[in-house]
Image (tube, rainbow, N blue to C red):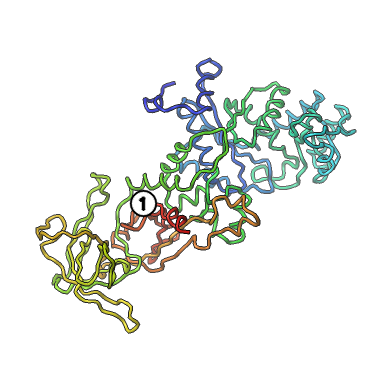
C-alpha cells in the first residue's frame, strides 16, 4: 500500500482509519468496495459523495470497486436509469472493476433462502402485510409470532417453491426470517425476505415472480462479491444487526457494514420520489434540468467532475447528519472554472455605440484566453466603428464613483481603446438608442502611450461580427434552505425565478466554435456552458454559476 505525500499529510477520516487498521493487521490483503444504486431514478449530488468515497477508498488503498445495481423491485426500475447511472459514474472519473446486478444472484439468493428454511430460520407467512405489521408490535412492546411460524421445514420448502412457480397472487404469501419478535430493533422482528410480485423485470423478464427484499439481497450480494467494506448512510444503522445475522446464519463470507452521514444540501431535495414528482409534474424540464440536484443536471449546467470531487473532499466523511451550504459547492466550481474556463465577451442587454472618429472598417485586437493560465495564449477580436456595450454600463446622470460610461466620461474597452462619450441619442420614449463616442488612437491595449488613466473597463462586441445567442440564467430551485422540512407541500417553496431566459444576447464570433466540453467565463457576467439544445442557427448557453455569491447578498437584503 503506497500513499502519496499529500495523502499522508491529510488527516484520515474514520472509515480510512478502519481500512488502514484492517490492512495493517492483516485482516485483508486488499479491500473491495461497491457502489450499489437502485436503478429507479437518476443519481443526485448525494450519490456523488458516495461514489467518490467508495471508488476513492479503493483507489487510495489499491483495491477494487464493483458497480452493483440493486435491481430487486421490477416495478420502479428501468434500463434508462441503469445507463444514466453508468454515464454519471464514468463522468465523475471512475471505472468499476465489475458491473454486477442483484438479479445476477437470484438463483443463489433463492438457494440461501432455502438453507435458512432448512435450518428452521425462515417460514412462509400467509398473512397480509397489514396483519404482519400489526403483529410486529411497536418498539416498547414485543411482537407476536403467528401460527405460520410453526410450519414444518418440508411445508415451508414446498410453499416457497410454489411461490416461485407462480401458484399464488401478489401479496398472498411472503417468506419471513425467524429472528426475534421481542427485539427492540423492529428490523429483527421476523423481517420479510421475499414477496410475490408478478411484474416483468428489466433484465430477467418474467422468469421470476418472487423478489428478495433489500435487507436479504444486500448483505448476501456483498458476501458473494467478497466486499470487505460495505459503506452505507446512517439510516442503515438499524439494519446492520440483520445484515450480520443473515451472514452469520448462512456461514458465508463476512462482509462488514459501516455507516457515514449522507449529504444534505441547502436549497435542494434529495428524495428520488420527490425529484420524480418535479419531472412528472413539469416543474422542471427533465431529470437533467440544470436546476435539478442530479449529477446529469449539474453536468448539463456546466459543472466539472473536478469541482464535484473537490466538494466531496471538502465536506469530508462524518458520523453526524448536517446541512451543507450550497455556496460551498458553488465555491468549488468557481475555483476550478477560474483556472480552466476561456474568457469570452458577451453583451446581455445591448446598447449601440458608434465611434465617430474611427475610419477603418475593422481591425483585429488580441485578448487573453485565460489570465490564470499563462500557457492558454490569446485570441483575436474584431474591433470596428460600431460596437455593443451593456446598457447598464451607461448612465446619463451618474452618481459619484460610477466609473463606467457617461456623457463626457472616458472608459477603456477591454483589449482595445479608450473611448469618450460625446453624445446620447434617445428615442421618442426617452430610452437610449445610441451613444456617439470618440476613441483615442494611441490608447490601444498593449501599446498605450496616450498617458491617460481611466478606472473603468467594459466588455463589448463588434456589431458587424456579433453572434446572437440565447442565455439561460439558472438559480436555486427552492427559496428556502430545507424545503423538505417546511410545512405543507415542498413544491410550494419552488423559486419561480430559478430560470431567466435572455433570448437575444450578442457574443463575440469565436463562440461559434464552442466545443461540447468547453467552459467559458463571460467576462464580468459569470461562467457558462453550451447546452445540448444548441444547434445550427441557435446557440444556447447555460449559466453554471455567477462570478460571486450573488444569492447570499440578495438574502441579506431581504
Q: Nearer the viewer, residue 523 or 558?
A: 558
In this image, 439 relative to 113: left or right?
left
Rendering coords of residue 362 (x, y %)? 18, 67
Q: How many marks?
A: 1
Q: Residues within 10 Å of mark 1 (few under 14, many from 20)?
A: many
Q: Nearer the viewer, residue 492 or 359?
A: 492
Q: Quadrant of residue 546?
A: bottom left
* Residue 448 vertical position relative to residue 50 in the rendered view, above or below: below
User: Farthest bottom residue?
Assistant: 428
* Residue 209 vertical position relative to residue 219 in the rendered view, above or below: below
Q: Quadrant of residue 36?
A: top right
Rendering coords of residue 100 (x, y %)? 59, 36
**SS label for mark 1:** strand
* Residue 447 vertical position relative to residue 467 in the rendered view, above or below: above
**Which residue is found at the position 27% from the left and 46% from the top?**
372
Rendering coords of residue 368 (x, y %)? 23, 52
**Which residue is found at the position 53% from the left and 37% from the top?**
50
Rendering coords of residue 252 (x, y %)? 67, 22
* Residue 60 vertical position relative to residue 306 in the rendered view, above or below: above
Q: Could you tell me which quadrant the N terminus lies in? A: top left
In this image, 314 relative to 176: left or right?
left
Q: Quadrant of residue 343?
A: bottom left
Q: Would you name the residue on which mark 1 appears?
A: 519
In this image, 545 relative to 139: left or right?
left
Amino acid at each position: 500500500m503506497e500513499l502519496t505525500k499529500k495523502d499522508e499529510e491529510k488527516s484520515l477520516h474514520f472509515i480510512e482509519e478502519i481500512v488502514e487498521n484492517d490492512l495493517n493487521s492483516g485482516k485483508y490483503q486488499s479491500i473491495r468496495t461497491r457502489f450499489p444504486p437502485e436503478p429507479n431514478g437518476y443519481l443526485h449530488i448525494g450519490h456523488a459523495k458516495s461514489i467518490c468515497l467508495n471508488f476513492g477508498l479503493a483507489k487510495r488503498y489499491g483495491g477494487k470497486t464493483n458497480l452493483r445495481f440493486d435491481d430487486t423491485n421490477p416495478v420502479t426500475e428501468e434500463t434508462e436509469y441503469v445507463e444514466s447511472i453508468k454515464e454519471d459514474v464514468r463522468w465523475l472519473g471512475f471505472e468499476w472493476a465489475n458491473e454486477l446486478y442483484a438479479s445476477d444472484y437470484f438463483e443463489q439468493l433463492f438457494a440461501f433462502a432455502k438453507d435458512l428454511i432448512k435450518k428452521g430460520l425462515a417460514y412462509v407467512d400467509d398473512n397480509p402485510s397489514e396483519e404482519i405489521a400489526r403483529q410486529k408490535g411497536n418498539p416498547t412492546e414485543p411482537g407476536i409470532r403467528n401460527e405460520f411460524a410453526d410450519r414444518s421445514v418440508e411445508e415451508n420448502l414446498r410453499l416457497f417453491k410454489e411461490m416461485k412457480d407462480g401458484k399464488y397472487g401478489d401479496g398472498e404469501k411472503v417468506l419471513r426470517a425467524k429472528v426475534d419478535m421481542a427485539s427492540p430493533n423492529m428490523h429483527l422482528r421476523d423481517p420479510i425476505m421475499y414477496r410475490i410480485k408478478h411484474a416483468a423485470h428489466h433484465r430477467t423478464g418474467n422468469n421470476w415472480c418472487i423478489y428478495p427484499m433489500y435487507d436479504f439481497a444486500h448483505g448476501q450480494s456483498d458476501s458473494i462479491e467478497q466486499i470487505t467494506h460495505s459503506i452505507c448512510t446512517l439510516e442503515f444503522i438499524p439494519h446492520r444487526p440483520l445484515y450480520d445475522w443473515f451472514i452469520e446464519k448462512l456461514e458465508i463470507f463476512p462482509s462488514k457494514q459501516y455507516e457515514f452521514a449522507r449529504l444534505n444540501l441547502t436549497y435542494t431535495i434529495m428524495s428520488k420520489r420527490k425529484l420524480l414528482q418535479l419531472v412528472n409534474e413539469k416543474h422542471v424540464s427533465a431529470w437533467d434540468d440544470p436546476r435539478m440536484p442530479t449529477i446529469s443536471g449539474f453536468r448539463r449546467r456546466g459543472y466539472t467532475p473536478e469541482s464535484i470531487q473537490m466538494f466531496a473532499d471538502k465536506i469530508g466523511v462524518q458520523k453526524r447528519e448536517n446541512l451543507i451550504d450550497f455556496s460551498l459547492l458553488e465555491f468549488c466550481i468557481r475555483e476550478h472554472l477560474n483556472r480552466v474556463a476561456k474568457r469570452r465577451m458577451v453583451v446581455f442587454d445591448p446598447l449601440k455605440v458608434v465611434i465617430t472618429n474611427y475610419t477603418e472598417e475593422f481591425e483585429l485586437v488580441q485578448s487573453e484566453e485565460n489570465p490564470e493560465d499563462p500557457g492558454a495564449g490569446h485570441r483575436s477580436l474584431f474591433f470596428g466603428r460600431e460596437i455593443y456595450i451593456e446598457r447598464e454600463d451607461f448612465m446619463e446622470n451618474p452618481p459619484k464613483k460610477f466609473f463606467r460610461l457617461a456623457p463626457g466620461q472616458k472608459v477603456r474597452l477591454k483589449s482595445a481603446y479608450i473611448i469618450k462619450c460625446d453624445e446620447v441619442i434617445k428615442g421618442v420614449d426617452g430610452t437610449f438608442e445610441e451613444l456617439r463616442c470618440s476613441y483615442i488612437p494611441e490608447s490601444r491595449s498593449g501599446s498605450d502611450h496616450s498617458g491617460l488613466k481611466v478606472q473603468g473597463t467594459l466588455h463589448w462586441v463588434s456589431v458587424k461580427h456579433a453572434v446572437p445567442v440565447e442565455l439561460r440564467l439558472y438559480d436555486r430551485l427552492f427559496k428556502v434552505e430545507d424545503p423538505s422540512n417546511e410545512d405543507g407541500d415542498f413544491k410550494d417553496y419552488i423559486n419561480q425565478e430559478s430560470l431567466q431566459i435572455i433570448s437575444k444576447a450578442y457574443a463575440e464570433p469565436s463562440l461559434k466554435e464552442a466545443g461540447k466540453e468547453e467552459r467559458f467565463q463571460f467576462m464580468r457576467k459569470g461562467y457558462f456552458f453550451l447546452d445540448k439544445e444548441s444547434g445550427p442557427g441557435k446557440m444556447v448557453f447555460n449559466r453554471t454559476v455567477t462570478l460571486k455569491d450573488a444569492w447570499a447578498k440578495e438574502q441579506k437584503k431581504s
